[in-house]
Amino acid sequence: MQWINAIVQGVLVGGLYALFAAGLSLIFGVMRLVNIAHGDLIVLAAFLALVVMQTLGLGALESLVVVIPLMALLGYVLQRGLLNLTLGSDILPPLLVTFGLSVIIQNGLLQVFTADSRRLNAGALEVATFNLAGIDIGVLPLVMFLAAVAVIGVLQFIFYRTALGRAFRATSDDADVARMMGLDNRHIFGLAMALSLAVVAIAGVFLAVRTNFDPASGPARLIFGFEAVIIGGLGNLWGTLAGGVILGVTQAIGAQINPGWQLLAGHLVFLLVLAFRPTGLFPRIAG
Amino acid sequence: MPEPILAVTELDAFYGDFQALFAVSVAVEPGEVLAMIGANGAGKSTFLKAVAGVIPAKREAIRFRGESIGGLSADRILKRGIALVPEGRRLFPSLSVEENLMIGGQLGRKGRWSLETVYALFPVLGERRNQASTSLSGGQQQMCAIGRALMANPDFILFDEISLGLAPVIIKDIYAALPGIVAGGAGAVIVEQDITRALSVATRVVCLQEGRVSLQGRPADLDRAAISAAYFGT
Amino acid sequence: MSAVTPDWRVERATATSRLAAVVAIVALIALAAAPAWAGRADMRLLSEIFTYLALACLWNLLAGFAGLVSVGQQAYVGFGGYMLFAFAILLGVNPLLTIPIAGILGALIAVPVAVLIFRLSGAYFAIGTWVMAEVFRLVFAQVSALGGGSGTSLPVAVVKDIAEGRDMREWIVYWAAFLLVVVVLGGTYWLLSTRRGLALAAIRDSEVASESLGVRIWRTKLMIYVVSAGATAMVGALIFLQKLRISPDAAFNVNDWTAYVIFITVIGGIGTIEGPIVGVIVFFLLRETLADLGSIYLMILGLVAIVVMLKAPRGLWGFVQDRFGIELFPVRRRIRYPLD
Ligand SMILES: Nc1ncnc2c1ncn2[C@@H]1O[C@H](COP(=O)(O)OP(=O)(O)O)[C@@H](O)[C@H]1O
Ligand SMILES: [Mg+2]
């Protein structure tokens, strides 16, 4: 029973990992940019939620109403003002600039908020559970998991069923021709980063409700998100969800055996996938 | 004599330090189809790219409908009504046939071309509208590339290597469609390797050689020897 | 600098580079004799500068020349450090001897690591290296014989193995650091002036070429990765020989062993031999003046690195070079070398 319980919790956490991953995967898909500051932006969103809750007196989930647009705006500005300058055939500039950004965000947060670890209070929702066939399921983790599924569904819809998604894909395929047809890639990339950081906002708030966080929590989130992307297969959002779930479950099983093995088990499954299925478990099917 | 719709005067074009076009002057009158011929590397694609705004040009060097458009960005030139069917088709591989067409139409110029009319022109595209553009044959891809350019409802179309790499029957189909495409518009430039074909559709021919105009005239006025001299530089 | 091959000198030496060689030799002699003129604190600072210079040089070799952008070199720094403690404490090996051992083992462990993470292309490779560093950290945190998560110190008896007297010990550690940085700098210079090194530069400069050359380039990259991992592990062993205490968090710290190193290289001039030297000087000058600012100092570093990356991608050194056409250690011609 303990095991089943651990696995269920792992599945639910996997949704959160998929949220970490989705924004990362999105911008890689559109502009081949790997954002090393992604994890730190998640933590930034968490702190932003903290401030919003304190100043506006909102609840944790309500704070999203403010945090999502703010992060999206930040994403657009960041892309147009900085990251667009780094794009080209050389992979060094985007990597090093986002790495610098990561250090700046981390230390900026440290400066403003100190190294104390925080947590967002989600009220009664936080402790509510229900029992399903003998397993206690937390309402909050379930809500998060469903939200993750919904977010990925929405992203999938945007990507494959809307004009914006079409523009994303066209620009990613051939920015020059897309430009000729009137798609300004600088603007499109800005929108992609805005969307990515909107997802980051959701991920940040959920992270902050679920666990303690501090200014140094970012890199681990980047890594979980990255592992979920690679396990699931590049360019496949549902695969990413599966990757997140696999990661979450493996970590839960590892922790069940020995608390020190939780993270290690997750990394191990990532390395196994890399060794035996380097394209991921669910590589994108053409079309 | 009517005012040319497209007037290119003394156009120079560069790739970095390399000069690809030297003072090229060409005029296209309303309703004309200009065929541009010339050996590989003569500068034909460069000419089309400069007109379409893909590579820089001096503002005054290119005039369209009496306005200087040289060096404007490609999307602004498209907004004014000039569309390019690029060499090598360059469809968006991760988009379906229909999505490729829709990207072409996304600037929203009004006109007679829409998904329906493009499908009527190339029925095979309609049959495969939801397939990946990569699943099309070469000829179908060319139709899709033409359709994508038409979706912008251009007044003036530039076709680069319209028949390159296609089977003869397909080429025939595409050329059969050409008059219908050009008829409603203000003019067209066709870059074509097959000189006979070029001469058959064109109202005027320009030959480029090493970045310079080596011959210009009406097909009827040019004999094969002159063309071949202008083409190969012998 | 002693590793300049004669034919190179004939072909490439300029008046400036000859002057640079003279200055370099004088500086080398002065630094080798530091115990005679420098105080204990100065020597510690110098040793630290040496280790950072070595790390920057090795990272530059990876990212600046082989196009392998790693943000996980702390894996090998920490690994080397832990090898020092493992061999010295558990097996009683002389601490100095553990440095080459760390190097060899670091290179060996880098082979399977590389085989795995080379499957990640370009930018994802960077994060892959970070994951590996995390794996190393978590594994060493599980080794209770080396203090587990909280770490351990080098026992006095082991420290005394280096030398009985404290002064002598400090000198030996200083000289070890000095020797290591000279070997690393000289080795990098030598490597880059060989044909293979030039081919390497071409790899970084053109992805198209690298695709068409496939396997050979993969092997060259592997060799560079493995060599720099081994050397980084040696530097790591030395760093923790200076510190005498290790813990997983200190050993595998991304800020200390990768962020600083990246900033040093980027600010000095990535892809140039002189860059890391310039960068390390700037870095320590900034640190001595701004260290009190704490996290603001790091923010400034990050900002400077971003600005440099965008405005002067070849760093301060590249800027000076373009301005004045100086070339101290002339391998930079690499860019103009064709592949074959
Ligand atoms: N992107 C480019 N960069 C540098 N040179 C180019 C580029 N494209 C074409 N060229 C050069 O410009 C000249 C004209 O090329 P192009 O216009 O493509 O010729 P054509 O279409 O007539 O075959 C050729 O010498 C070609 O090598
Ligand atoms: Mg051409």
Image (tube, grey):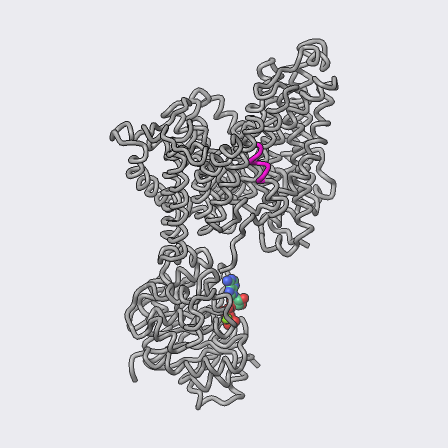
Q: Is residue A163 left or right of residue B13?
A: left
Coordinates of residue A124 in the picture (x, y in percent): 32, 28
Coordinates of residue A215 in the picture (x, y in percent): 42, 28
**Residue C187 appears in which quarter of the rendering?**
top right
Q: Nearer the viewer, residue C234 or A285?
A: A285
Q: Main secondary structure of the magenta part?
A: helix
Coordinates of residue B19 in the picture (x, y in percent): 49, 65
**Residue B229 appears in which quarter of the rendering?**
bottom right
The mark total stands at 0
Q: Residue furthest front?
A: A133
Residue at image point 33% right, 78% down: B185
Asked if C180 appears above or below C37 in the picture, the reply is: below
The magenta-colored residue range is A264-270
Is residue C218 inside the magenta stretch?
no
Q: Residue furthest top?
A: C165
Q: Quadrant of the N terminus of chain B?
A: bottom left
Q: Is residue C225 left or right of residue C258?
A: right
Q: Quadrant of the C terminus of chain B?
A: bottom right
Asked if C187 appears above or below B38 in the picture, the reply is: above
Q: Is residue A209 left or right of residue C115?
A: left
Asked if C15 appears above or below C217 in the picture, the reply is: above
Q: Nearer the viewer, residue C234 or C60?
A: C234
Q: Nearer the viewer, residue B152 or B210?
A: B152
**Residue C94 appears in which quarter of the rendering?**
top right
Coordinates of residue A278 in the picture (x, y in percent): 60, 47
Regarding residue A220, the answer to whether it shows in the image is: yes
